[in-house]
Image: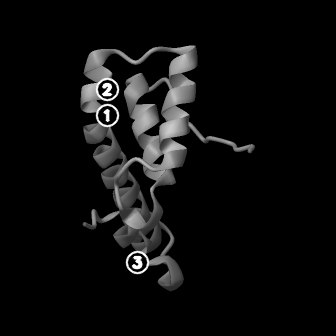
Amino acid sequence: FRAVIDFEDATRHYFIYDLGMAVTGMCAGGILRLSETSRALLTGYQHVRKLEKSELETLPLFIEYGALATACWRFWQYHINAPDVERAELHLQMVKKN
């Protein structure tokens, strides 16, 4: 399995922010929960750098923050910056569903 992870805002925020954004990107259909793939990412990450207790506790908040940031960017991009009717509803994918 090979992948490229785009840490576009890396080093500008807390380490856990990067992980929250990565997990958000792995969430299918806007459902914000840890998938098998995102659990593997976290396990692999911790082989390189152990997460602190406070980071583990706040990870769910950073996953939600990642979803909100993504939704805001998509809304701005496809409604204001470069309107695109075909992508205009993409921000709705980031809405938390139960």
Q: Is residue 58 left or right of residue 19?
A: left
For the C terminus, the image quarter is bottom left
Mark 3 or 2, which is nearer the eye? 2
Does 9 appear above or below 78? above
Residue occupying the point 49% across, 31% down:
42
Position of residue 50 relative to residue 92, above or below, is above
Position in image of residue 55 (x %, y %): 31, 23
Q: CA distance from mark 1 to mark 3?
A: 27 Å
Quarter occupied by residue 73: bottom left
Mark 2 and mark 3 in contact (Cβ < 8 Å)?
A: no
**Residue under circle 1?**
59
Task: State the SS at label 2.
Answer: helix
The kind of secondary structure element at disc 1 is helix
Q: Secondary structure at mark 3?
A: loop
Q: Mark 1 belongs to which amino acid?
A: Leu
Q: Position of residue 23 (x, y in %)?
A: 45, 44
- Identified by mark 2, the residue type is Leu
- The image shows residue 86 at horizontal and vertical percentages of 52, 84
Q: Nearer the viewer, mark 1 or mark 3?
A: 1
| Mark linked to residue 2 | none
What residue lies at 43% left-to-right and 68% top-to-bottom?
29
Indicate left or right for 57 with 24 as reference.
Answer: left
- The 10 Å Cα crowd at callout 1, few under 14, some 14 to 19, many 20 or more, is some
Label 2 crowd bin: few (<14), some (14–19), many (20+), radius 10 Å: few
Circle 2 is placed at which residue position?
56
Check the image and name the residue furthest to the front.
36
Q: Do the CB atoms of the residues marked 1 and 2 lie less than 8 Å apart?
A: yes
Residue 9, percent across and down?
49, 35
- Amino acid type indicated by mark 3: Glu
Residue carrying label 3: 89
The answer for how far apart the CA atoms under marks 1 and 2 are is 5 Å
